[in-house]
Image: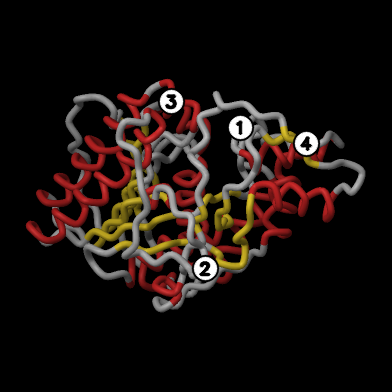
Amino acid sequence: MNKTLEEDITLFASRFPLYEELRDKSFMITGVTGLLGSCMVRCLLALNERFQLHLRIIAVVRNLEKAQLMFGRPDNILAYYVCDFASTALFNPPSTDYLIHFASPTASKYFVEHPVETLQAGVNGTEKVLDFARKNPLCSLVYISSMEVYGSVLDDSKPLTEEEQGYLDPMSVRSSYPMAKRTAECFCRAFAEEYRIPVKVARLAQTFGAGVSKDDHRVFAQFSRNIMQGKNIVLYTTGEVKHCYCYTMDAMSGILYILLHGRDGEAYNVANEQTYISILDMAKFLCREFNPQIRPVVELNENMGYPPATKLRLSSRKIQALGWKPQYDLKTMFERLMQSMKEKDM
């Protein structure tokens, strides 16, 4: 864990207000070798150490060796359970109080090259988790979804609430990811209604921060590398797509607010409304704020697997009603990201 991420997690633990509600609880976290799953495990470990909460964490992993390199060998706080959600393997881990299901592919190129596996991991994996919750009652479960479930939305005259939807083309291979997320959300609602499973859905805006891999191919990472290297920012589209963003630590607190205070069977946007910006304007913003000697350059490439042009101005009113507020603005998000990318992993 690099120094910047360590600082973020220490700060998170010092100001997360709901820590006492976690005391003596057990957690199951899937997808722990990904950015967000690993951040959640680290945040819980930090809260446990700071406040002596006596937490127990079960990390669900596909690659045990990789997980142990990240978190160490199992002990009386952290245990591992191996499962590949894209396979037909059974999911029968120990019972738990809380479950957060992060496990999912995240790279656009992967969605295009492996649409079957993307659908299998997203849909079949979530069904396994929900069926586990049906057979092993727990206090709360959060399914980690994505703003991509909204599909193509072109009217951004008002913030997009959780009740609205745009168009998704089911015949597009790139739709394997958002269609899997939509189907998994439908499963969550169905299990909540039919079996009274205490499941909630967290629809994350594009989320990044300290800990993002130096070779990540998503635009925020590409742009950051260009800034750091003093190279013009290359856009492979016209940059008209507009999104809200969220810093990793804000996402962690938002997910825990939903876990503890959200309503069963409902979805919540996790986004910083103040970060709403187009890809092109983001490139201009980064050049202006961090390196005025470079500029954005458009080099169209239709084979990158990016989602279709859309304007996802997400409303965060529903999650803010739970008491959550984002702490990081866009400039600080990129400052922390680039500082992290400059460091060598410890």
Q: Considering the numbered disc 1 on the image, is that residue within a helix, a strand or a loop?
A: loop
Horizontal and vertical percent position of residue 37: 44, 45
Is residue 57 toward the left or the right of residue 299 in the image? left
In the rendered image, which quarter contains the C terminus?
A: top right
Kind of residue indicated by mark 4: Val
Q: Quadrant of residue 15?
A: bottom right
Viewer-side residue, 53 vs 125: 125
Alpha carbons under labels 3 and 1: distance apart: 14 Å
Q: Are marks 3 and 1 in contact (CB under 8 Å)?
A: no
Q: Which mark is drawn over residue 41? A: none
Q: Nearer the viewer, mark 2 or mark 1?
A: 2
Q: Quadrant of residue 331?
A: bottom right
Q: Which residue matches tag 2?
A: 157
Horizontal and vertical percent position of residue 221: 66, 39
Is residue 124 toward the left or the right of residue 17 in the image? left
**Label 4 or label 1, whichever comes before in sequence order:** 1
Kind of residue indicated by mark 3: Val
Residue 92 vertical position relative to residue 300 in the rendered view, above or below? below
Kind of residue indicated by mark 1: His
- Outermost residue toward the left in this view: 194
Q: Nearer the viewer, mark 2 or mark 3?
A: 2
**Label 2 or label 3, whichever comes before in sequence order:** 3
Q: Are marks 2 and 4 in contact (CB under 8 Å)?
A: no
Q: Are marks 2 and 3 in contact (CB under 8 Å)?
A: no
Alpha carbons under labels 4 and 3: distance apart: 25 Å
Q: Which residue matches tag 1?
A: 217
Q: How many marks?
A: 4
